[in-house]
Amino acid sequence: MDSKIPVENLFSIEPVLSSSSRRSISTHSKASSGNSIREVNFSDLGSKPVRYGSHGAESETYSMSQKEINDEDARLVQINDPVKTNERFEFAGNSIRTGKYSILTFLPRNLFEQFHRVAYIYFLVIAVLNQLPQLAVFGRGASIMPLAIVLLVTAVKDAYEDYRRHRSDTIENNRLASVLVNDHFQQKKWKNIQTINLDGESNLKTRYAKQETVLKITEKEKIAGLIKCEKPNRNIYGFQANMEIDGKRVSLGPSNIILRGCELKNTAWAVGVAVYAGRETKVMLNSSGAPSKRSRLETHMNSEIIFLSLFLIALCTVVSVCAAVWLRRHRDELDYLPFYRRKDFSEAEEENYNYYGWGLEIFFTFLMSVIVFQIMIPISLYISMELVRVGQAYFMIRDTQMYDESSDSRFQCRALNINEDLGQIKYVFSDKTGTLTENKMEFQCASIWGVDYSGGKATSQDQEDGYFVEVDGKVLRPKMKVKTDPELLQIAKNGKETKDGCHVHDFFLALAACNTIVPLILDTPDPIVKLIDYQGESPDEQALVYAAASYGFMLIERTSGHVVIDIQGVRQRFNVLGLHEFDSDRKRMSVILGFPDQSVKVFVKGADTSMFSVMDRSMNINVKRITEAHLYSYSSLGLRTLVVGMRELSTSEFDDWHSAFEAASTALMGRASLLRKVASNIENNLCILGASGIEDKLQQGVPEAIESLRTAGIKVWVLTGDKQETAISIGYSSKLLTSKMTQIIINSNSMESCRKSLEDAIIMSKKLTTISGNINNTGGTLGTVLTPVALIIDGTSLVYILDSELEERLFQLACNCSVVLCCRVAPLQKAGIVSLVKKRTVDMTLAIGDGANDVSMIQMADVGVGISGQEGRQAVMASDFAMGQFRFLVTLLLVHGHWNYQRMGYMILYNFYRNAVFVLVLFWYVLFTCFTLTTAITEWSSVLYSVIYTSVPTIVVGILDKDLNRRTLLKYPQLYGAGHRQECYNKRLFWITMIDTFWQSAVAFFIPLLAYWGGTIDASSIGDLWTLAVVILVNLHLAMDVIRWNWITHVAIWGSIIATFICVIIIDAIPTLVGYWAIFEIVKTGKFWLCLLAIIVAALIPRFVVKVLYQLYTPCDVQIAREAEKFRTLSESAAVEIEMNPILDPPRR
Amino acid sequence: MEMDTNGATTSSAAGGGSTSTSDSSSAAKKNSKKPKYSRFTQQELPACKPILTPGLVVEIVDRYDEGCVPSNYSNDKLAYIQSSRTNKSCTRTLSVPKLMKGPVFIYYQLDNFYQNHRRYVKSRSDKQLRSKAYESETKNCDPEGISPDGPIVPCGLIAWSLFNDTYGFSVKSKMLEVNKKNIAWDSDKENKFGSDVYPKNFQIGGLIGGATLNSSIPLSEQEDLIVWMRTAALPTFRKLYGRIEEDLQANEQITVVIQNNYNTYSFGGKKKLVLSTTSWIGGKNDFLGVAYITVGGLCLFLAVSFILLYVIKPRPLGDPSYLSWNRSPAGNPT
């Protein structure tokens, strides 16, 4: 095999002519740049990847950097020596196969996979049993047919899916790359998978080569070295390795690896060593399918199926016992009975013929009855459900109302087994940033040295062009314009002349420098105008840099060694002496800049709490107080705030720091924590420069969506990392909170105070609930929802509550509240909250989020929804459903969820009924055949019954039927309550259906029986009558319940009946079958048609009567809404007034 | 209905004809007021003339399995029927209650005979019955599949147990002819039972199950066998024996000479002779009538109840105020 090892160490060389000097790689889903990357692989033969890196800085849960690699866990890669590298292990090649099968292996592998499922084993066992001569109920062909059809349908489905995977594999495996083979570069096929956008963040991430390796490339000598790295794993934000080169040990981290699936930017080429290849690359390890979940409805269904199994066993037992009694009573006659003839007289000795003794005969009877009654357990239902879900997913994916134009993304159904759960969601847990909001940050206002500048609105139009600079006759202009405050702009322009100007200068310098943004110069149609596009991992930072640029502090160039900032037209170069990246412990980042005048300053920016704790105590208290006041008012407006600070370093301080930093950053053990310590040491005694307010706009339609969800009886919990004030103000603007609500706020710092506030809150919420109850005498079913209590709780309190006995109290409290808002929560706490609810209630939970920090919560909830937005694909990859905008959730739940639930619930019940009615008809007949399991219905009809005669309509109805139209469902969100109340599938309905089944089967069987009793009818003819009667009955039963008839439904239902006639005719046209011509003989008689009519009328009357009475006198909401839909034209004007009130203002009651 | 349509076409054609006739003689009869002839104007359209006659089915049922056993054997019927020396003849007299219009169908009816027993149903070879080429296809037929002389044709328990009682009818000493042709389905005669398949080695084993077959007549013409091999669906069944093509007058006494050969005594099955006319609805069976009256009555009752309910306690359809969240407590203003 070829050698392995993709990616890794990226030796980069400054392209001499390139103006941008720092190598950056961005992840992009475009695959086009394959050939532009010249990639060198220091191993011959091989395959070669290069791959793109991505790095999510702030996700500490993903970071493994503190862990040291021990030898057993390590993978050793010899640079440029594939033989040695592979001598101990065969590492995987780089060719990627996402397809499961090849043409040769398809049959065995697919069969193997399919037989992993219980359903198929059931079919197989039954088919095998039937092959035993003593048990041969059906002929060979007929007995294998159900299994064959099921296998075929599934195989076709699998084959199609696999074909699509193969196609994309082929495209990607044929890309080209250069590989160093015996010191020559050769073009080799680039074996690669489709460029899945790994974390989906289309912003730049910086990757750089170790200084030690940069020089290597120029030397012509053969490069040799050893890389010791982790075993392949799924963590895309972590990588740890050491490289031994020229006897030096160099440590490598996540910023030195390029992962498969990324795209190189800002450099023409890169040279690397492949470390992980093919299926061991991180993108492949991450591309495992969606987690397999089982829907609530299916779980309920399985318990009913257990009941059906018991019922099947009961039927078989009845048959066996009766057969035993019969054999016992006739034991003396059996030898001569003309229709039994136990004795074989043809031989000299009279032997028993085909008789195995009493006990075995009974046992065989039992097994035979299992074979005959096999469809009592609706195994085909599982296959039908799969098909129906595929169909439902098809329509969900193609719903134009869930198509996001801005990102050109359709709805995605990643999990195919839980469509119907969408109709029963009771709790929605939502992330805020990127989910409720767009995650497009916009700089709004700044407070600098105690002065608030937030009057930007007026000027935004005056300055059409925004700020720009001219360099070498070229105009540089930021890509995005920012509203500027004229006063502040003026001060900034005036430079450092005033004290204010000084602060403003420092403030914006901090904004421009203290970040990890990389400027990209883009060409425009106008040759002299260039745009600067700021790319970076954090949207907040982007907003701040754009803001700084608008005020004249334009970041022009950033490398690992320096930044170039154009300050009011003057280009200045600052050395970046050190950079402490953001981490969620410190909640701040800092950069140490060496000024042209040799002074050294540290600029820090971070969250307010973390900043005020490290500020200079001697600082002007007034400024601090005013800044805090400004911060408060910003967050009340829903703005995200950051505080900026600065300190000048003395030479000694700097030297101390520098040596500590050097030591820490080359440490092999616990590098991350050492760096954090170094950072904390330097980030203190800061002078607070000011604060910024960044607006994160609400997504379109969010308030309406939340309103709809609430009206639908869904509890919306918002879990956010934001500050409480920000969260509350977003809560108001998204209509999550209303002024009518009483807010209960819990901020506690200890277990005890938590307990106390929880108890107080419970009492208070109870009081409010009962008071409102007294006033309203609430009769509505949404009792607690109507009581407007909002709970706001912060992460600190949650620390004490989660995983302690207080969870129970929080749950009680939360149950009384219509809204819960959790702020400042850590990612793992989000999952904790979800599991807190999930553990204590049977209600369905849904989590929706867009970022890596929502992954745990998405996986925890019953249904996980990912928003494919700015923050990457981590959430989407963990989710069951993915979509572009939060507001689609309303369509998804209220419309598709409702439909899917209703369809699936009905379909399950109907399938139970459909199979049971047929089995019971067979069973009744067995009672008249000495319990010997003769079937009057031909074996082929028995087998085709669930395959051709009745299967298509139920699938079509399961996919297409709509109990209400979209408009009505959106107009009355309360209709969603049908799913909460389990109206479409519950034990009661199951039993009613079973009683109905019993009646219908009895009618279908006994009317012909009694009508033909003592007549000349032969078994085949009456069998045909029963076949047709049952099929027509079952299809008419379905027709009676279909709500929306379109031509497909018509074709399916009537077509099935016609197909049944055709099949019966074909079967009866085969002269070697017993029933030859029976159907033609029987349709000539009037009795046949009279029986058919009598069966259909008599069988359906009870159902019809119950249905009519139920609809007339205890109509469910869905029923009324359906009528309203139909008669809308008559009552519209009157109705609208009555209905609209409660919907617009539910808390009013 | 069909006849009406035909009539209409015919009459218009006739009308057309008469018009052309009158044209040719228009000069002469120009002013004649004689109405033109047409079947329509003369009310002579062809029509069917249904007469509401009570299509009653008249049926005579005579159980003879016990009566035909001589009294000295009544305690050991099995010995009687199994013995080849006993006289199996037996004479029964039936009286005709009402006029029976010919053809009168003769059935034999067996009770408690499970022609639908699994062992029995399977014990046949449809291939063998159909074609000489498959003569040795007897795998399902055991223990009546192969005799020492070769395969049995027709093989299997069904054929082996072929009914072999015979009936002779006479009225006032005059023999009534029994037509035994066309008692089986044409389809069976033509396609299912081969015209080149002749009985072979049939009923030569140690245990005789029933009738023997004339080995010079092909199976396709052995109509009794064909009828018998359409196995009955239910343990009580009739099979067509033949037809009397004449009318039987009311109160006539019919003398039946029965050869009581068939052994139903071993399992206590009854044997009955049935003479019956038939109608479009089939033989005499009241169940369907009762069922229709019951179901019809029920439907009528329900229809009336629903109307009453609708009048007494109607519910406006699609009224949003009935929605559960709008069905607010008393005193809630709208």
Image: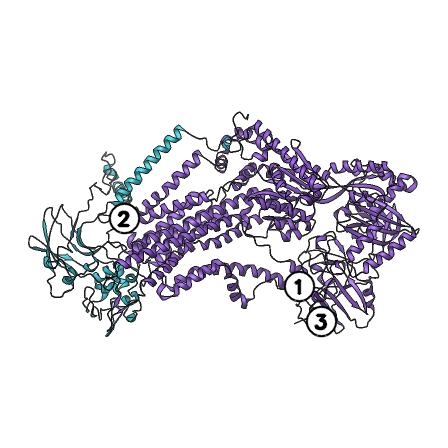
- The reply to whether discs 3 and 2 touch (Cβ–Cβ < 8 Å) is no
**Tag 2, which secondary structure?**
helix
Task: Give the numbered dot on residue A280.
Answer: 1
The subunit letter for the residue under badge 1 reads A
List the residue tagged with mark 3: A85
Task: Give the numbered dot on residue B248.
Answer: none
The subunit letter for the residue under badge 2 reads A
Give the CA separation, mark 3 to mark 2.
84 Å
Q: Position of residue A755 (x, y in %)?
A: 67, 39
* Residue A815 position by quadrant: top right
List the residue tagged with mark 2: A1010
Badge 1 amino acid: Glu
**With B245 as the anchor, is A160 left or right in this view?**
right
**With B16 as the anchor, is A481 left or right in this view?**
right
Give the CA separation, mark 1 to mark 3.
16 Å
The subunit letter for the residue under badge 3 reads A
Badge 3 amino acid: Thr
Which shade is chain A? purple
Q: Earlier in the sequence, mark 1 or mark 3?
A: 3
* Local crowd size for mark 1, using a 10 Å CA cut-off: few (<14), some (14–19), many (≥20): many
Q: Which chain is cyan?
A: B
In the image, is residue A659 above or below residue A461? below
